[in-house]
Image (spheres, rainbow, N blue to C red):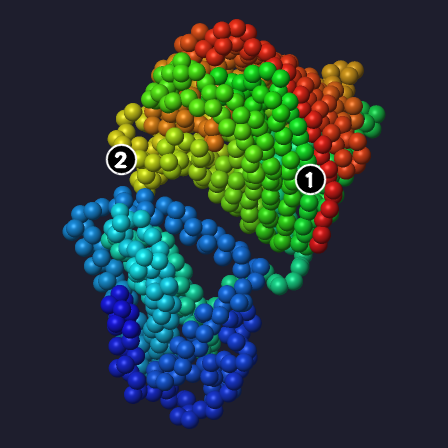
């Protein structure tokens, strides 16, 4: 036990209070000196065992069972009971506890990942460290003194509430310290400063968790439950937070140590108060840690987890046609993916409007709607509430792709033969993909998995001349070219766990975003690259701002914080983004977005740099290395459905600018992607047309290829696992893409596409040109089977890569089985 006292000196204040009062036995004048002890049933939801509960006494005033709290052997017995209940509490975890347990575990994991960066960038001044350490010691001693003083004050004034608060606060602090000490011996984590602050576990250290944080939060938890006013909570939890933060700032603990210690302390205080508090004395209610019942129940859609519809799903084109016809109003086209419940809401609204429309004019739209209504039948049944505990197998699929000639595979420098394909590898020859997708929902929670096995053949190494060109345009040293190995790999694409809190869906995992009304690919964030590993917060259904801002109409907000992979520096950089979109009228939508790449190898995250990455709008050239907020890219997009043409025509545009708050502030430095969509032609209701013209070759720029999608620190900035995360046109490019579909039925169509792109010769010597044309045929063989055939002929010319015109033919066939399997 010597180690316990050495690393938790402030516990002496609590235990000293206990020792001094051991001979005393507190009682109020109204209490009988020999009360009759009985056993009472535990409070529902408590972790107290039914076969052994705290000793209780009959109150002479009311005859009710009340816990008996006094210092002495009973307190020691209660501590033993508390320890039993705390250590066995994991056996009582239920699904409903995930509402707080999963976010807490995720936050702890995030701190563990960034602990070393945080420790390395804290002040190293010996006087500063001493001040923080002294503050934590004095702060904890002050809290102990306040609790002891409250106990003595209660005894002197015969105030049983104050006396109990002192007893239970000390008891909770001892409980928390016993737990944290046991974990210290088990985990053996090194303290900050040892081994360059790597924070390794099982090395004989004593850093994880923090005793100071555990004791402070235990006392604060009891105090806030005994006196549940707002000011009391601010003071008690504020003091506990100050103690915890000062332990990190003083380099005695890592952030994760303080967080876990704080959690142990709060839970210990909750357990002690719940088990031993005398309800006749007043105080608050120690509510259950979960409000979710153990059985399925009715719940509204705003409290239901729902998976996102994959970005390459057949569902979005159909919903896009219905939206272009004005059959539902609140859909934000420039922010995808949408959840299945949100899609079902759109389908329901479209059905209501179709019922009021002329059947002769809406026959084709009704067929589209019927197909969507069948797809979302499960979600439509839950729009009014219900139980959503279920398991779904969404799809099983296999795809083969044959490329006959040399393809373009480097969209960051030249171009891509295949794009918007989630970063799947491809090379000349035979390529294949086979996989599955499915999800499970339970209350607020959703888990989604899409996994597949990918194969692509090997490819010869690029020439040394090409490697030198790439090194020059990227301002990198020349890397020795090497052959591209054959890929035979199993991968999870979109794979995440999420929960819905009042229409805000929080999720963590690998996810894809689509931040633009454009179909060829957003400039800022698309599915061209492998899904980003992120923590994601998304407002799944639009809301309305209060007051004067109501005129902005329905609003959606989306944000994420993640990491990028496959960069030249290791570890890769952090990546975060935010977008807010507005729809002030039925026909007009606009949105503002921003992404930031920061941190990583050689440029660790600090609190100052992180805050600057969210709010700074100055040029990065004016920042010092210590305050550089990273590569910030602002975006703006809009779409407008032209009412004069019976809503057949929608015009839209996407734009971005680097190191500027918005492209609207610096249009000469911006990239643009204007487009138009004609939902059908007069007299040909089954034919549509979409044309887009992306441009990243801005009028004013810093240097050839070194502005959009490039950064002076991360020279392969806007990529994830080697694929560009933005638009297929790439760096310093200009292009046009035209697509026309003829809808044979609601889900069967023939699609023709033409694409042209040119790369600026100031970027790539002698420039480059890409031309391709393709035809795609999607056909549903039966209700549960679909086939997609694709043939593309491409010509490209990059004198740097090949002296003559190159051609290739890409043919692909995908078969998908949609089993419609679900289990409740």
Q: Where does residue 219 sit, x and y in percent of width and height?
A: 35, 67
Q: Are marks 1 and 2 in contact (CB under 8 Å)?
A: no
CA neighbours of label 2 inside 10 A, class few (<14), some (14 to 19), many (20+): few
Q: Where does residue 315 sit, x and y in percent of width and height?
A: 68, 33
Q: Secondary structure at mark 2?
A: loop
Which sits earlier in the primary sequence, circle 1 or circle 2?
1
Q: Secondary structure at mark 1?
A: strand
Q: CA distance from mark 1 to mark 2?
A: 48 Å
As drawn, the residue found furthest toward the left would be 127
Q: Is residue 430 visible?
A: yes
Q: Where does residue 295 sit, x and y in percent of width and height?
A: 65, 62
Q: Is residue 516 visible?
A: no
Q: Residue at x 37, y 81 (%)?
A: 76
Q: Residue 395: which numbered mark, if any?
A: 1
Quadrant of image for the C terminus: bottom right
User: In the picture shown, does residue 247 fall above or below 180?
Assistant: above
Residue holding disc 2:
626
């Amino acid at each position: 036990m010597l180690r316990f006292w050495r690393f938790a000196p402030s516990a002496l204040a609590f235990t000293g209070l206990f020792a001094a009062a051991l001979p005393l036995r507190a009682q109020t004048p109204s209490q009988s000196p020999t009360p009759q002890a009985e056993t009472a049933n535990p409070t529902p939801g408590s972790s107290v065992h039914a076969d052994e509960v705290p000793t209780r006494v009959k109150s002479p005033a009311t005859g009710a069972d009340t816990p008996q709290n006094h210092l002495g052997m009973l307190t020691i017995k209660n501590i033993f009971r508390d320890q039993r209940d705390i250590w066995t509490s994991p056996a009582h975890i239920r699904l409903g506890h995930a509402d707080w347990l999963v976010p807490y575990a995720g936050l702890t994991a995030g701190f563990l990942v960034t602990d070393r960066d945080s420790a390395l960038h804290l002040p190293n001044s010996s006087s500063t460290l001493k001040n923080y350490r002294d503050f934590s010691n004095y702060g904890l001693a002050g809290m102990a003194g306040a609790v002891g003083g409250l106990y003595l004050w209660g005894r002197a004034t015969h105030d049983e509430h104050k006396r109990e608060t002192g007893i239970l606060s000390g008891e909770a602090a001892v409980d928390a310290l016993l737990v944290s000490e046991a974990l210290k011996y088990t985990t053996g984590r090194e303290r900050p400063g040892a081994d360059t602050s790597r924070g390794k576990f099982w090395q004989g250290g004593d850093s994880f968790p923090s005793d100071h944080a555990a004791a402070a939060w235990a006392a604060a938890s009891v105090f806030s439950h005994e006196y549940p006013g707002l000011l009391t909570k601010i003071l008690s939890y504020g003091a506990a937070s100050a103690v915890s933060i000062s332990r990190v700032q003083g380099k005695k603990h890592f952030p994760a140590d303080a967080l876990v210690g704080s959690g142990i302390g709060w839970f210990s205080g909750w357990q002690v108060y719940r088990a031993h508090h005398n309800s006749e004395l007043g105080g608050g209610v120690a509510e259950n840690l979960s409000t979710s019942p153990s059985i399925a129940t009715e719940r509204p859609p705003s409290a239901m987890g729902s998976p996102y519809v994959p970005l390459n799903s057949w569902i979005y084109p159909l919903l896009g046609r219905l939206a272009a016809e004005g059959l539902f109003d609140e859909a934000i086209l420039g922010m995808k993916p949408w959840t299945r419940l949100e899609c079902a809401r759109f389908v329901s609204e479209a059905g209501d409007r179709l019922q009021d429309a002329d059947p002769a004019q809406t026959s084709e739209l009704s067929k589209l709607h019927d197909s969507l209504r069948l797809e979302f039948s499960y979600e439509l049944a839950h729009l009014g509430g219900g139980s959503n505990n279920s398991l779904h197998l969404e799809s099983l699929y296999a795809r083969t792709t044959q490329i006959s000639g040399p393809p373009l595979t480097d969209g960051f420098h030249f171009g891509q033969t295949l794009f918007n394909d989630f970063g799947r590898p491809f090379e000349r020859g035979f390529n294949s993909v086979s996989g599955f997708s499915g999800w499970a929902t339970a209350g607020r929670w959703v888990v989604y998995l899409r996994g597949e096995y990918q194969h692509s053949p090997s490819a010869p190494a690029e020439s040394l001349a090409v490697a030198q060109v790439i090194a020059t345009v990227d301002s990198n040293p020349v890397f020795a070219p090497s052959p591209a190995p054959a890929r035979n790999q199993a991968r999870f694409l979109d794979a995440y766990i999420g929960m819905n809190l009042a229409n805000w869906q929080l999720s963590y995992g690998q996810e894809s975003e689509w931040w633009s009304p454009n179909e060829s690919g957003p400039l800022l964030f698309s599915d061209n690259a492998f899904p980003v590993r992120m923590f994601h917060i998304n407002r799944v259904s639009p809301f309305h701002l209060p007051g004067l801002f109501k005129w902005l109409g329905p609003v959606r907000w989306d944000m994420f914080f993640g990491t990028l992979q496959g960069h030249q520096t290791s570890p890769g950089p952090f990546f975060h983004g935010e977008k807010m979109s507005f729809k002030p009228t039925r026909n007009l939508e606009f949105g503002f977005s921003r992404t930031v790449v920061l941190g990583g190898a050689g440029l660790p995250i600090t609190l100052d740099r992180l805050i600057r990455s969210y709010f700074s709008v100055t040029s990065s050239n004016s920042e010092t290395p210590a305050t550089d907020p990273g590569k910030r890219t602002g975006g703006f997009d809009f779409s407008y459905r032209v009412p004069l043409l019976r809503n057949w025509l929608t015009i839209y545009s996407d734009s971005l600018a680097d190191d500027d708050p918005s492209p609207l502030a610096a249009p000469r430095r911006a990239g643009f992607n204007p487009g138009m969509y004609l939902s059908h032609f007069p007299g040909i209701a089954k034919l549509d047309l979409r044309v887009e013209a992306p441009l990243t070759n801005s009028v004013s720029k810093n240097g050839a290829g070194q502005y959009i999608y490039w950064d002076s620190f991360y020279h392969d900035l806007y990529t994830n696992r080697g694929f560009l995360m933005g638009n297929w046109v790439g760096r310093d490019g200009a292009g046009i893409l035209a697509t026309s579909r003829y809808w044979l039925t609601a889900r069967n169509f023939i699609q023709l596409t033409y694409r042209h792109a040119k790369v600026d010769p100031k970027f790539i010597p002698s420039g480059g040109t890409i031309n391709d044309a393709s035809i795609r045929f999607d056909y549903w063989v039966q209700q549960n089977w679909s086939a997609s055939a694709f043939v593309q002929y491409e010509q490209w010319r990059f004198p740097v890569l090949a002296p003559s015109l190159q051609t290739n033919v890409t043919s692909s066939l995908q078969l998908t089985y949609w089993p419609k399997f679900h289990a409740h």
